[in-house]
Image (cartoon, rainbow, N blue to C red):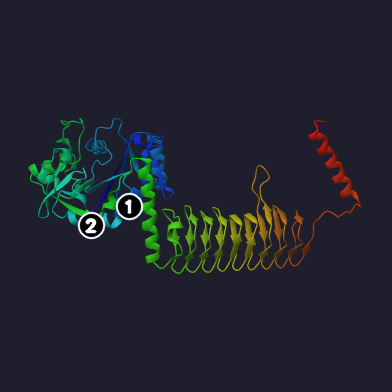
Amino acid sequence: MSIALVILAAGKGSRMKSDLPKVLHQIAGAPMLVHAMKAGAILSPEKQVIVAGHGAEAVEAAAKAYDPDATVVLQEEQKGTGHAVIVTREALTGFEGDVVVLYGDTPFVQPETLERMVAARKDNAIVVLGFQADPSEKYGRLVMQGDTLEAITEFADASDEVRAITFCNSGVMLIDGKVIFDLLDATNNQNASGEYYLTDLVEIARNKGLSSTAISCDASETMGVNSRVHLAEAEAAFQARARQTLMEDGVTLIDPTTVHLSHDTVIGRDAIIEQNVVFGPEVTIESGARIRAFSHIEGAHVSRGATVGPYARLRPGAELAEDTHIGNFVEIKNAIIDEGAKVNHLSYIGDAAVGTKSNIGAGTITCNYDGVFKHKTTIGKNAFIGSNTMLVAPVTVGDDAMTGSGSVITKDIEDGALAIARAQQVNKAGMARKLFDMLKLKKKNISKGEK
């Protein structure tokens, strides 16, 4: 059965106290909307429709950045969840598969849960996702008769008997696409809020002789984000789950609570991640690599057996081959560090290629930016770059070549050559004492108010 994914993302989120649409606030480096889209992707949807409202242009840009084929429709007035799905009518014209309704501010519904909803569809027109909660919580209740969902009753409208039910409504639904708009057309806004509710579809379907059911998931999957406090709680929940998954997959996290992951971090088994490491988006760490403490990595690929840190920074485009060493206070940006090469301390390597088994001395800088353009530095294999070398790009250092410490390299170095580029040292006898005496006198006169 084909699937259409509808994600409701029109709310302003006034409790966020923000000009940014609520669904664009980030968890683990990605907007909440993208988390919902990623969860739905497991169903290989034929159509993906985002219902936008407040900040629609920004919402559309974020949706299409993740999936260029996504359709974004506008809900100009927010008249409830039922109305939000009604505005997808044109986008879903001719579609007769199943429609899954998710929420852009409920980012943690798991892909396997959605697969279970699809499996529960069978002869039911509607499948609702529920969760267990304390009876004191004011969620809508799912009234079940065996496997049949009889009704969704809002807490305010529920009797004491119904309030005692602990099976609660998440809002997530799967609906038969052949009947969804017939059911929605039968809703009304004759209620205290004056809104059209998606939850009314269960009763409408029953009156039309159509059955509904509900499945349960862990309550953590249904966490909604409505404030900055909720956002922080959601971030913590994501990190805890992601860390646990990595460790279960064979990754060592020496102090898990201090490691911060991105929504798309990939780490291979037997990798070791030390304390206080931050992963930004688009990072892959291969099996057996070690990331040492206090390192920050984004947009980078670290190969098997490589060591990074402590206190290292890998920026987008950093590509580390096997058995490379990147040490403390080293920054790598848009550079390929080939197999066995070492950049052990206090260096910046940007827009560069470093050959196999080359050694980059402390304080080396690739001077890649001229104020307008970025230029490339190429270092061959088995080269030795002396400490405090400035490589003024574009420049090439050949295989087996060497630079003298403190050199400013502005010309290419051929294979096997030693380049020394320093100003000639001149020692002037007694000049240091004279200079110090002059400066001390000047300081004394300034302290007396003299010029």
Q: Identify the residue position indicated by label 1 in the image.
A: 39
Toward the right, the furthest residue is: 429
Asked if 201 appears above or below 428 in the picture, the reply is above
Q: Earlier in the sequence, mark 2 or mark 1?
A: 1
Element type where label 2 sits in the image? helix
* Residue closer to the observer: 86 or 114: 114
**Placement of the C terminus among the 4 image quadrants:** top right
Asked if 11 appears above or below 311 in the picture, the reply is above
Q: Identify the residue position indicated by label 2 in the image.
A: 116
**Placement of the N terminus among the 4 image quadrants:** bottom left
Q: Amino acid at mark 2?
A: Arg
Element type where label 1 sits in the image? helix
* Residue closer to the observer: 391 or 151: 151
Residue 15 position within the rendered picture, expressed as x and y whole percent measured from the top left: 35, 36
Residue 28 in view of the camera:
yes
Q: Left or right: 436 with respect to 203?
A: right
Residue 180 position within the rendered picture, expressed as x and y whole percent measured from the top left: 18, 42
Residue 69 in view of the camera:
no
Q: Amino acid at mark 1?
A: Ala
Q: Left or right: 237 with respect to 127?
A: right
